[in-house]
Amino acid sequence: MVPQGSKTTVSPGSKTTTPQGNKTILPQGSKTTVSPGSKTTTPQGNKTIVPQGSKTTVSPGSKTTAPQGSKTKVPQSSKTTVSPGSKTTASQGSKTTEPQGSKTTAPQGSKTTAPQGSKTTAPQGSKITAL
C-alpha cells in the first residue's frame, strides 16, 4: 500500500522485481517514475491497480514486462506515458483495461507488443496516440 500523494522513483539502471502473487495499490494522486534504463518486472498473476488521477511515466529506454495472466487496471482520467524507445510487453492472456477518458501516448520509436490471447479495451472517449 502506497499512501495517497506518495512519490516513488526508480533511478537509472535500477531493477525492481515484484514476486508472483503480489498486489500493488497506488492510491489516487500518486506518482510513479521509472527512469531511463530501469527494468520493472511484474511476474505471473500479479495485480496492479492505479486509481483515478494517478500518473505513471516510463522514461526512454525503460523496459516494463507484465507476464502471462497479469492484470492491469488504469481508471478513468489516468495518464500513462511511454517515452521514445521504451518497450512494453503484455504476454499471452494478459488483460489491460483503460476506462473512459483515459489517455495513452506512445511516442515515435516505442514498441508495444500484445501476444496471442491478450485483450485490450479502450472504452468510449479514450484517446490513443502514436506520434
Image (cartoon, rainbow, N blue to C red):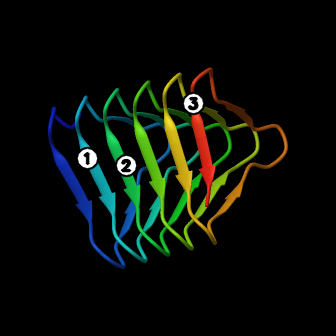
| Residue type pointed to by label 3 | Ser
Q: Is residue 119 left or right of residue 71?
A: right
* Residue on which disc 3 sits: 126
Q: Is residue 101 left or right of residue 38?
A: right
Q: Is residue 76 above or below residue 71?
A: above
**CA distance for labels 3 and 1:** 21 Å
**Between 128 and 39, the one nearer to me in the picture:** 128
Tell me the residue at 58%/37% (across/down): 127
Circle 3 Cα neighbour tier, 10 Å, few/some/many (<14 / 14–19 / ≥20)? some
| Residue type pointed to by label 2 | Thr
Tell me the residue at 37%/62% (across/down): 16
**CA distance for labels 1 and 2:** 6 Å
Q: Is residue 97 left or right of residue 37?
A: right
N-terminal-most mark, 3 or 1: 1
x then y, percent, for residue 101: 49, 26
| Residue 23 quadrant | top left
x then y, percent, for residue 5: 14, 38
* Residue on which disc 2 sits: 56
Circle 1 Cα neighbour tier, 10 Å, few/some/many (<14 / 14–19 / ≥20)? some
**CA distance for labels 2 and 3:** 17 Å
Q: Is residue 64 above or below residue 78?
A: below
x then y, percent, for residue 45: 57, 37
**Between 84 and 49, the one nearer to me in the picture:** 84
* Residue on which disc 1 sits: 31
Circle 2 Cα neighbour tier, 10 Å, few/some/many (<14 / 14–19 / ≥20)? some
Helix, strand or loop under label 2 = strand
| Residue type pointed to by label 1 | Lys
x then y, percent, for residue 71: 57, 33
**Between 113 and 44, the one nearer to me in the picture:** 113
Quadrant of the rendering where the C terminus is positioned: bottom right
Quadrant of the rendering where the N terminus is positioned: top left
